[in-house]
Amino acid sequence: MKIGFLGLGIMGCGMARNLMKAGHEVTVWNRTAAKCTAFAKEGARVGATPREVVAANEVTFAMLADPAAARAVCLGPDGAAAGAAAGHDYVDVSTVDAATAQAVAAAVTATGARFLEAPVSGTKKPAEDGTLIFLTGGDAALYEKVGPLLDVMGKKRVFLGAVGQGARMKLVVNMIMGTMITALGEGIALASKSGLEGAALLDVLAAGAMACPMFAGKGPGILADSFPTAFPLKHQQKDLRLAVALGDELHQPLAVAAAVNEAYKRAIAMGLADADMSAVARAVRG
Ligand code: NAP
């Protein structure tokens, strides 16, 4: 199939490559054009604008940083919606709030094209390995059509209903993730000040009901104060900010998530925006 891919960041690179490996004819575009060079060498076409990519392909995926980026790439004069028409499909896999997903959906569907939101759970390695989890909402027929493409990039997909439900599910999931990693950071700091070995704490956690792949994966980095970026901390703070805003909108108290959001803001102020999200451990260490 002829597929467009907008956004070659940490996640987009792995996802676009998996579509190419599966034999699809992929056209890439990225705001910073230099990131397209490696893809061109690997056989991808390179589009000049999102508009051109959407117009030239049957299905276009977008994997962008945040709501501002998702809106800019879709809604601008050379944006994706300007290239859309009946017969074209647009699948936004960025993590955004429901209002952004709905604004993008409205612009795309007004052209006669179809829209699916499909934010992902998983990080850099699952994006490379094709083991992401897609949280989708929108056009049910499009969900069925792109199912085989999502299966190339992921191991699980769920359809959650109207546009906005995928975004909300993703924000809830990442709110829980941000609070868990911050709690681990605090626990490691407290253990260390108690004269306990951090490795012993991870060992105890791994043996019981709190064992989880994230603690096993990120824990050693926190112990070593080393945070190679898989999920940029600035994006985790964006997700906490959007989750707290969703709580405001729905009058749902989020005392823990709000405190964790403050820890993430502190980490950004400490210069850790582009480090891995687990670098929040440095901000809570005191
Ligand atoms: P990233 O490496 O920071 O890449 C962000 C992408 O967005 C880049 O292609 C960037 O282009 C583009 N972009 C940013 N602002 C833009 C703008 N105003 N106009 C056009 N393009 C713009 O981020 P990532 O880790 O791949 O994450 C992408 C999305 O997936 C985010 O919503 C994130 O929350 C979500 N996500 C990430 C992970 C993860 O573990 N990394 C996991 C699940 C979901 P440039 O190259 O020009 O900067």
Image (cartoon, rainbow, N blue to C red):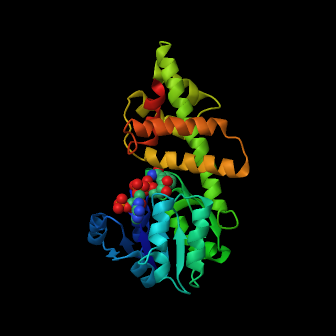
For the point 48% across and 39% down, which residue is it?
265
The reply, left or right, for residue 22 in relation to residue 37 is right
Q: Does residue 121 lie above or below 175 as drawn?
A: below
Asked whether residue 174 is in view, the answer is: yes
Q: Residue furthest right?
A: 251
- For residue 157, say whether it is visible: no
Above or below for 266 versus 96: above
Q: Closer to the camera, 156 or 164?
A: 164
> Residue drawn at (51%, 18%), measured in percent from left and top?
191
Left or right: residue 281 compared with residue 167: left
Residue at 56%, 36% in the rendered image: 260
Estimate the x, y position of residue 71 in percent, counting from the top left: 49, 67
**Residue 17 appears left or right of 193:** left
Give the x, y percent position of residue 154.
Answer: 53, 60
| Residue at the (55%, 58%) spot, across then down | 96
In which quarter of the view is residue 117 placed?
A: bottom right
Answer with the quadrant where ligand 1 appears in the image: bottom left
